[in-house]
Amino acid sequence: MQTNLPLSPARLWDSLMEMAKIGGTAKGGSNRQTLTDLDAHGRRMLQAWGEAAGLTLTTDRMGTMLLTRPGRDPARKAVAIGSHLDTQPTGGKFDGVLGVLAGLEVMRALQEAGVETEAPIVLVNWTNEEGARFSPPMMASGVAMGLLDEAAMLATTDTADAVFGEELRRIGWQGEADPAALREFGAYFELHIEQGTVLEREGLSIGVVTHALCQEWLDVTVTGTESHAGASMQGRRDALVPAAMLVAAVEAIALAHGGRGTVGRLTLSPDSRNITPSEVRLTVDLRADDAETLGRMVTALRERAAELTSSRGVEIAVENFWTSPLVPFDPVLTARVRDAAAARGLPHRDMAAGIGHDAVYVARRLPAALIFTPCVGGISHNEAEAITPEWAAAGVQVLADAVLATAGVVR
């Protein structure tokens, strides 16, 4: 299972640091949002590195970069390695980038060793995984897997009314390849930082991701009546107070059901210091390890909203925004990741992914595996995001072993 590729953890680390300079922030993070000039700069750097390693670049209509190394048998379906280079506005150096550049390191080592694989191997940089500038996230992988509509995504606008498709053309990264062709991959591997504390807390180097949690996103609107802050407390229909109670209920429901619950956005109207809000809108994100538990969490939230409607004299509407099912990762590929970690003597464990990744969309259509490495304090989407060179080295070693076990090495 263990390969003898001349992987260079030092070169991988240097590449991570070099990419982080593009959009580098004062606090040590990266701001390389999708389809900005900085994104284009990062893409050009990846292209140059890939072509120097003998890879051939193609780009699809969503801007996804595909850097291909041929195999002995061109009829075999390609094995893909991927993640993303785009970041949050105050992002870190490793979220997504680790997966892309670890894949590049595998390609560089193959080139240096002159190793031929049976199947082609493709390095993928997905467009707009983060969804920071254009929503929804995981846009290009969703289109490629037939889960999002291509025309609708190309027409998406950011807060400044810039159009996704127009920005993609402006920075010179809209290709001609059909995104649907990516459904022909034979297997897909993604290496990613955990964005949680489990691996670091347990002293482990590798997380073998068996499945992604199911999710339900809800939009909640609380409607009351605005009134002067100096008016009597009796008879008020302040929309913010029951909204605050719902925020607390989301946390309580998640804890009671062993799931996860978050209110990520809260907006109120008329948003004046001395007026009770007449309308509050909040977003709710509920996640669980199985559909039944998630359903009970949603029901509990709706029941609490009904109670507050009655007791507080307001109207509360709870509407479904987006649903993602529980997504299992391919058991054969997952076993190869597990075996690779064991063969190298790396402490590891099976675990779930509570966060969306391109690999989750891919796994709904193709055999896919997701590998986690620890990150310091579980901090991510933050300029303070950090990993160690040792964790990066462990990740790329396991990634290489699992990929070559799948692509097949010509003897």
Image (cartoon, grey):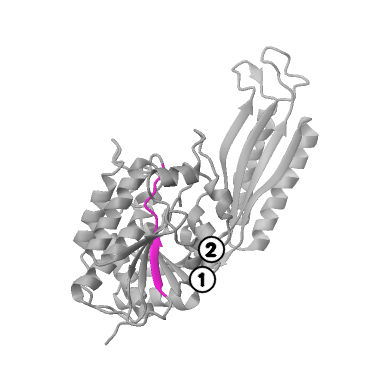
Residue name at image x 41 percent, y 68 percent: 189
Answer whether labels 2 and 1 touch (C-beta < 8 Å): yes
Does 79 lie within the magenta span?
A: yes
Residue 145 visible? The answer is yes
Camera sees residue 388: no
Q: Magenta part of the protein: which range?
A: 78-88
Number of the front mark, 2 or 1? 2
The picture places residue 377, in percent across and down from the top left corner, at 37, 50
For mark 1, give the secondary structure.
Answer: loop
- Find disc 2 in the rendering and name its residue: 145
Pointer 1: residues within 10 angstroms few (<14), some, or many (20+)?
Answer: many
Q: Is residue 263 positioned above or below 348 on the image?
A: above
Left or right position of 411 against 316 = left
Q: Which percent across, then down, holds residue 217? A: 62, 49
- The kind of residue tagged 2 is Met
Mark 2: which secondary structure? Answer: loop
The structure residue drawn at horizontal position 43% and vertical position 77%, both measured from the top left corner, is: 77
- Rounded to the nearest angstrom, the CA distance separating label 2 from label 1 is 9 Å
Residue farthest toward the top in the current orientation of the protein: 230
Decide: is 19 above or below 396: above
Q: With 86 as the anchor, is 310 left or right in this view?
A: right
Quadrant of residue 404 within the rendered picture: bottom left
Residue that mark 1 sits on: 366
Dot 1 amino acid type: Leu
